[in-house]
Image (cartoon, rainbow, N blue to C red):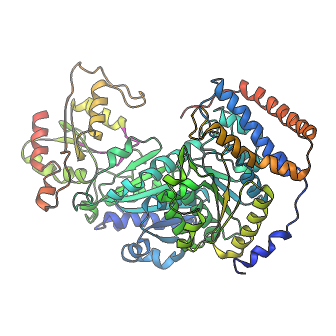
Amino acid sequence: MTRDPWFRNRLIRDAIYRAIEERMRIDPSVYLLGEGAEMKIHFDAPSIERDFPGRVITMPISEDSNTNFAVGLSLGGCLPVVDVITADFLFRTMDSICNTAAKQATVSKPRTIIVRAEFMTGGPTTGQRLEALFTHVPGLNVVIPSNPLDAYALMRDALSRPEVTLFFEDREIEDATSFCWSSVDDILPFGKASLWWPGGDVTVVTYGLMARRLQLLRSRAHELGLSYELIDLRTIYPIDWETIFGSVSRTRALLVVEPDVKFGGIGAEIVARVSDGTSEDGRVPYGRPTEPGIATHRLGAPRITIPIDFDQRRRLVPSDDDILNAIAALS
Amino acid sequence: MKFDDHLILTQQFAHPGPGVRFRTMLTARLLEDRLQKICLAGEAGDLHFSKGQEAISTGVCAALRPTDHMVTHHRTIAHEVARGADLYKLVAEVLGKRTGFNGGRAGEMHISNPDIRHAFSFQLVGTCIPVAAGLAWALRYHHKNDEIVACFFGDAASSNGQFHEACTIAAIHKVPLLLVCENNGLAGNVTKDKYLPTANVAERMGSYRIPAKTIDGNDVRFVESSARLLLAWIRDGNGPAMLECLTERLCHHKQGQGDIRTKEKLAELALRDPLILEAERLGLSSDAQTTMENEINAEIDRVLERVRLDPVAEVG
C-alpha cells in the first residue's frame, strides 16, 4: 500500500476523504455533517458530492448540538463523521464530546463516532491546540496524522472501530504532499506508532506537524553528526508505549517534541512514564528509574495566547535549531 | 392535515381500560418511595425522582407505539416503569448492579434500554434534545420509517442553549420528534422567575415554528389523548411538535437535598397529585387502593431481595 501510486503528491485532506469515500461506498450508514459540510465537500471531495448527495448534512453554527445530534444519529444506527472545522470550536462542543459521546460506550453500547477538526494557524482563537486536553478524557481516541498515508490509514481504521475518535488535522501540513518511505512496507495498525531509523543515538517522540519537521530535519542532523530514532505517535491515545520503551531501551535518551503548549502536555506523560519505568496500564515494565538514568528533555510551545503576526506565531513551536541542539545535548 | 385539525380528533381515542394507567403511576410512585428509603438508609447514592409528575410519562408512553423511541432527562425511573421495563433489571441498574440493563454502569441518570426503545437518558440538562433530534433524523432519512422519538425534558432545559440549537435543527429538518416538556416550574432548587422569561415554554416555540400545546400534565388521560393527537400529526410527516405538561414535583430535587419550598407549599401542591385525580375518576375505594399498593409493594420486595444479592458493576 505504501507504494500505491495514488499517494504520490497527495494532500493529507485528500487521503482522509479517500478513506471516508471508500467506506461510504460499502456502508450506507455513513453520514458527513458539520457547519458548511456541503460547501466543503463541493471543493474538497466532488465525488462524494456527486455520488452521495443525501449523506452530507449541513448544520447550523451550533457546535455543541451538532455533535450531540451526531450521537443521536449513531443511536439510530448511523455512522456520523462530524466536521467541527476549527479545533478552537471544540471548546464549544466539549460537553457533547466528553459528556455524551465519550460516555455512551461505557453506559450503553460502543458506537463509532468521528469528530474532525483542524489546528488552524490564525490567532488567539484560531490556532489553539487541544490534543492534550482530550487525551485526559476516558472514552476518546485522539489521532493526528503527519502524512497522507497515515491520514488515510487512521481514518479508515477509525471508521471501523466502535469508538469515539477525535481526528485532528494539522493545517500547516494539510497541503503537504506525500512521498514514499522505503522503510515502511505496510500500513501500521491503529494505535501503533511509526518508528523511523532505528539505530539512532536519541529517541525523538513527536506527532503531526512536528513529526513532519523531524522527518525533513534528518539530513541536516546527519551533517552535524547527529542521529535519532524518530517515533511518530500517529495516535496520541491510545499511545504506543511498546515502541517508545523499545526505542528508549536502545538509546537511553529521550526527546519529546510537542507542537502543543508544553505545560501539562503529552510530553510530560511520556517523560514521566519512561522515568518511572511503567506504561499506563503497567503492562510494559521497563528497567528501574535511575539505574542507569535515562536522559530526557521536552520541547514544546509556550503557554501564551496565539499571536496574530505570522512570524511570532511560527516561533511558538520549537525551531529546527532548538531541536538539533536538544538532540546534540542528549547524544 | 393542519395541526389544528387534529385537535378535533382528541376525543376519538378509546381508553384501554380503567385502572391501567393508575396502576402504572402507582408503581412508579411506590418504587421511588422505596428507593428513597434505601437512599436514606445509606444503601445507595442520591437519586432523582419524579414524584407528582408520573402522569406525563405514563400518559405519553401509553400513546407511543412499541416501535417508537424515547430519550429522556435524568429522572428516568417513572419513564422506565411507564414504558413497561423489567422492574428487576431497572432496580439493579439504579443501584449499580451488574444485572442491570447497562451492567450497573449507567445508574438512574444514564439509562438506556433497548427492550423498550429507551434510547438514552442524560444527566446534563438539555443534552437529550439534540440527541433525540439526531435519532429522529436517522429514523426519517436513513431508515425511512414512520417511527417517532419522544423526548422528555424539563422547563428549565428550555433556558439551555442546546434546547434552542436542537429545536432549530429539528424544525429545519422536520424530524419526527415529540418534545415533551415536563414543566414543574423548577430548575433544581431555582424558581422559574430566575430562568424563564416567558409565561411558559410553548411561548418560545413560535420562533422555531414548532406547534406547541400546553396542558394540565397531572391529568393522565388528557396527557395521553393530547400526546396521541400530536403523534398522529408528527407521523403524517409534519415535523416536530411540543406537548408542554404543567405539573408539580412533589419530591426534592435530589434525594438527600433540601427544598426551596415550605412544607405548607408542598402540602398545597400535593392536592394536585395525579394519583388523587385519577383515583377519584376511577371511583377507587381506599380499600381497593390499599390492595393494589400491597400487590405492587410485594413485587418490589421480591425484586429488591434478588437485587441485593447481585454483584456490583464491573468498572471500566
The answer to whether B302 is drawn above or below residue B102 in the figure is: above
The answer to whether B309 is drawn above or below residue B281 in the figure is: above
Residue B181 in picture, x, y percent from top left: 63, 58
Pick the quarter of the image with the N terminus of chain B: bottom right
Residue A328 in picture, x, y percent from top left: 10, 38
Which residue: 41% across, 45% down? A191
Q: On the image, which quarter does residue B137 sit in?
A: bottom right
Residue B189 in picture, x, y percent from top left: 54, 43
Magenta stretch encompasses residue A215? no
Question: What residue range appears in magenta?
Answer: A230-240
In depth, the one of A66 and B31 nearer the eye is B31
In depth, the one of A258 and A150 nearer the eye is A258
Residue B305 in picture, x, y percent from top left: 78, 26
Furthest-left residue in view? Answer: A224
In depth, the one of A42 and A23 nearer the eye is A42
Magenta stretch encompasses residue A238? yes
Which residue: 45% across, 40% down? A138
> Image check: B283 left or right of B208?
right
Residue A194 visible here: no
The answer to whether A213 is drawn above or below residue A262 in the figure is: below
> Image check: B94 left or right of A102?
right
